[in-house]
Structure formats: C-alpha cells, structure tokens
Image: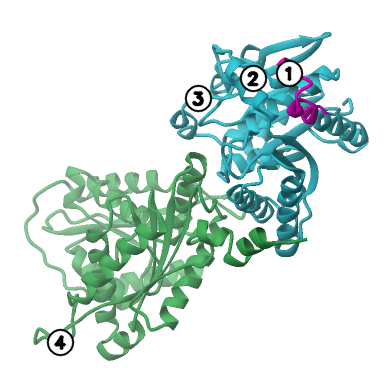
Amino acid sequence: MADNTTLSIAVLSGKGGVGKSNLTLNLGYVLNALGNKVLLVDCDMGLANLDVLLGITPKHDVGALLADEMAPTDVIVPISQNGGHAFDLLPASSGILEASETQYNIPDRLVDKLRETLSAYDYVLLDVGAGISPLALSFGAMAMLRLVVITPEPTSLTDSYALIKVMASRYSVRDHFVVVNNYESEQEERMAHKRLAAACEHFLGIAPSAMGAVRSDPRVSEAVRAQKPFYELYPECPAGQDIAELARKVNAMRVAMLGRIASLTPLRDLHPSRPETLQKNS
Amino acid sequence: MPTLPDNNKRSSALWESCAATEAATPEASIMSELEALRRLLQNADVEASSIHGPAPQEALLRAASAASRQCPSQTFAGQSVPGLLIAKAFPGITPEVWNRLCRECGLKGWAALPLESCEANPLEPLVRQLERAAFGRDHDLLTSLPNRTFFERMLRQEMERAGNTGGSISLAMLDLDGFTALNKSFGQEAGDRALQAFAGYFTAHCKSYDVIARWEGDAFTVLMPGTSVRQARAGLERILNGLKNSPLVSSDNNGGGISLCFSAGVCGAGPENGYAPVEEMLRQAEDAMLEARKTGGARVCLSPDGSDPLQALVGCDEKQFLFNFRE
C-alpha cells in the first residue's frame, strides 16, 4: 500500500460562536491556495453552516452517504479549483433529529465510507460541532491533529478547558493546538493562551501548544455576509494576514510530519474490532 | 413391551431419554434407577376401575414419539452418542402420586405425561415444561423478574442505543435493608415472600419501560432508559417513600407487618457526561449503593462519577485558576 500523505485536522471548540467554522473555511482556502488538495468535512450534524458560509446549497449531504444511498463522489461538492488542486466540501446532514436517530455510530460509519476517498487529499479538515457531545469528541479523537479555537472570553476558556479535559479522560487524547480567534490586543491574546495552557498543565499535565491567532477584524463579518471566505475577498486585511500565517505553519507541520503519518489511515478507526469492518476485510 | 391392562381409569406414561442427559448414562445407574422405579410402583397405591379414553398402548406410543422428537440424537464430548428413550405406561398412577414417589425416592430427570391428555394434545404438558425452562433462562423463578443474564444483555443494548442517539440513561443498584435479619427472625419462607412482594411493588410503581432485575440474593438492578440521574433518583425516592408507608410482608398471623426499605445507588450516562462502558456503570452504581447503605440505608445515593457532569467537569479551583492566572 502507498504511504499515506493525508493529514487530518479536527477543528474543535468548547463553546459555540467563536468563529470556528469560518476559521476552518479560510484555513482550508489558504491551504488550497498554497497548492494543496483540501477536503472540508462539515461534522456539525445539528447546525451545519459551512455551506451557508460559502453561499451554496448542496443537493445532497453526508446523510445520503451514511444511509448507503450515494457514493462519496456524489455527495462531495467542489468549492473551487486552484491550479488543478481540488478544494471540496462534504456537507453535513442538516436536522439534528435525522442524525441522532440513526441505528449506527456516525463517526465509525463515516470512516468506513470515506476509507478510499480521503487519500486523494493533502488535507482533510473536520469542522466539528462545538461542545463536548460524544459525536464531537469522536471526530476530535479520529483526526491526527486537533486545533482548539478559543476567544479571550472567560466562558470560552472554561469550555475549552472542559473539552481538553474530557478528551483526555474519555479518549486519552492529550495533544492539542490552540488558536486564539477574534482578539483585540496582543496582551489579551497572549493571556488567553497562557491561562488555558497553565490550567491544563497544572490540573491535567497537558501542555496545549499555541498554534496561531487571528485578530478581530470587521472584514470577517463583511465576508460572512457576502458568503465568501474573508481571505478570498480581503487577503491583506489583518485577519487575512493572520490566517495566512496560520496556514503556513500548518503546511510546514504537515511536511515535517510526512514520515510519521505514512503508516496511518487519514482518520483513526476508534472501534477497529467492530463486525462491520471485519466483514469488509475478510 | 409388556401387555398393558386396558381397564384403568387413570394411568401415566413415563419416559426418559438417556441421551438427553449431559453425559452418557452409566449402565449401573440405569439398573438401580429402574429397580427403584419397579419397587416404588409395586408399593404404590393404585386405583383400578373401568377405562375411558384411548388404549394405553396407542397413547404410550404417541407419547414416546413426542418425547423422542423433543430429544433428537445428542452429542457427548463432540461424539454423537446413541440414545434410548424408555417409555412405559403405568396404569393407575396419577401425576400427584408420581411426584410424591419421585420426591421420596430421589428419581430425577423423568418426565411423566398423563395418558388421558395424550388424546387431546400429547405435547401440551411437554410444551409447558419447556416454556418454564425457557422462562427460567432469562428470569428469576422466585420473583418472576428478569435475571442477571437478561439484565446485562438489556443494559448493553440500551447503552448502545443511548450512545448512538445521544440519549440519557440511568442505572440503579438496590439492596434490601435488613434482609438477613428478616430471614433470621421470620424464616426463609417469609424472606422469599418479602422478595416477591418487593418485586411486585416495584414493578407496579416504576415506568413501563424501566427494567428491574433480581441481580443476586436481595440485590436488584434497575435500568431506566431515557432517564437522567436526577429523574432516576426522584423516581426511586418516590418508590422508597411508598414502601416505607406500606407494609408488604405480614410478620405473623395477627396482621402485623414489616415495611421493606432499600439502599440504592444511581449512576447515569448521557450527552453531557458521556457513555462509560457497561462494567464501569455497574461499578459506579454498586459503589453508590454501598455508600447509601453505609450512611444508614433507606436512601438513594448518586454516583460521584459524572452524576452532575457539568458541575463536576470544571471544578471551582480550576475555574479560579483559569480566571486569575497571572504571569
């Protein structure tokens, strides 16, 4: 089997409304602009909004894939083509009831369905719903890297801390990268990360690394209203410069990690012994 | 086959499939058992009178064929072993007499079918026996509640359902207070009646989709799907208060009664606190139950593990650290 070159990144947040989806979209956009094939997976099964941020209305969503009605290629929507490099979206199933009443475990099933598809991409970005639902935690644990998006607000700090704590206790996942979003001053940004990191180290023995920060910028909400990535519309705005810097860091990290990820599958199978997988392999 | 008298009012066909026992039957044990059978039937009190119903010979063959269909050829230690179904009609022996004789002589593994029932449905008594055996596999025969095996299966199933749908589920372990003392003072029969009465009361007062099982001895487990730990505690406390006020077991024949109380431990799983493995849930419920017993009994304790998930997730000291940290 060929070496794996796909890096999966789960973008998480303890609290909703910190700009996680928008950050994921723009990170994906810049990574694609840097010459990578990128797949965005909207994993927020309840309140999906990557499609809204892009101003598209996909005909089908991940629900059809999970229900065995369609193949991954029928459901994945191309967002743009940058010099032949795909930038695609796998839209989430809207309607929380639909998603929660399924008979199967959604993350497990998704891993099975996307097994073949993901290896075509350099990056798979999982936009995971906010909070600590089992679904969000599973998606977080499946990815190779985790970006925890926080804002300097105390509520965001507490909820992110809870997320990191519960990821460690339930999934033994202890590596996280922190991105501070929507900050006003350097001091505020630095303290937000410092406080979270200090509490994690003190109580959990975990040291989440600082990965980057994106300034508060009126251009961001202008772009949301225009339903375009802010980096596409205003690449030189402060938030645009910051997201580009973040993407460069992530890109450098992938290159450095290529050796380590060669033997991995793009998304980790959390329940490798379950019968469905065994049948497929035998 | 001996010639059978055809003028008996009541008679039984007896059969036993040797192959149906777990091991091959030693010859000597068959001989001694048949000898015991011969002696006891000789001495039995046999009533003879005119016959109504099918000829015993024909009924016997029908009963034998029915029995052999229930016990097809068996395997022992991986090898197919030949078996023998022995059937004989005993005119004049009623099922009641037969049961008494079996008790007195220690005969085990024999099935007796009344000959007169053979005409209507020869399999009926057999079916009843099999139904009882099947019920006994999943249920406790004293209280008729599901047993531990059945409960664990349900618990796994409901935990999986809750995990996949993001629902809440609660588990409780109950222990009757002072049950050993009750057994000692009033005898085991009174103890058994107490267990039955408790099972009946609880079943009548819990939700229709709750599952209560006899775990072991005087310990019970309750599975409450779609129920948060707080709701579960409220429900159990309601039942506990009801029990305190209604004596279930009479202590004597003069109308005196004993109130049964229990110590309960509750733990839960749900979207906020996640879904612990089944073994972990059982441990949490048991620990909480022991805590309830240690602190005086007749109470419901919540497991400290995730019983109040949102509060417990980030403690006060952690919050203070997050908000007050200075470089």
- Determine the CA span between mark 3 and mark 4: 65 Å
Question: Are the residues flagged by discs 1 and 2 in contact, CB closer than 8 Å?
Answer: yes
Q: In this view, does B5 lie to the left or right of B207?
A: left
- Determine the CA span between mark 1 and mark 2: 8 Å
What residue is pinned by disc 1?
A: A234
The chain to which mark 4 is attached is B
- In the rendered image of this protein, which colour is used for chain B? green
Query: Sequence-wise, which precedes: disc 3 or disc 1?
Result: 3
* Quadrant position of the C terminus of chain A in the picture: top right
Residue B212 can be seen, yes or no: no
Specify the amino acid type for callout 4: Asp
**Tag nearer the camera, 3 or 4:** 3
Question: Is A119 rendered above or below residue A146?
Answer: above
Q: Which residues are the magenta region? A: A233-244
The chain to which mark 2 is attached is A
What residue is pinned by disc 2?
A: A223
Image location (x, y in percent) of residue A15: 58, 43
Specify the amino acid type for callout 1: Tyr
- Determine the CA span between mark 4 and mark 2: 83 Å
Q: Does the magenta stretch include residue A242?
A: yes
Q: Do labels 4 and 2 share a chain?
A: no
Q: What element carries label 1?
A: loop
- In the rendered image of this protein, which colour is used for chain A? cyan
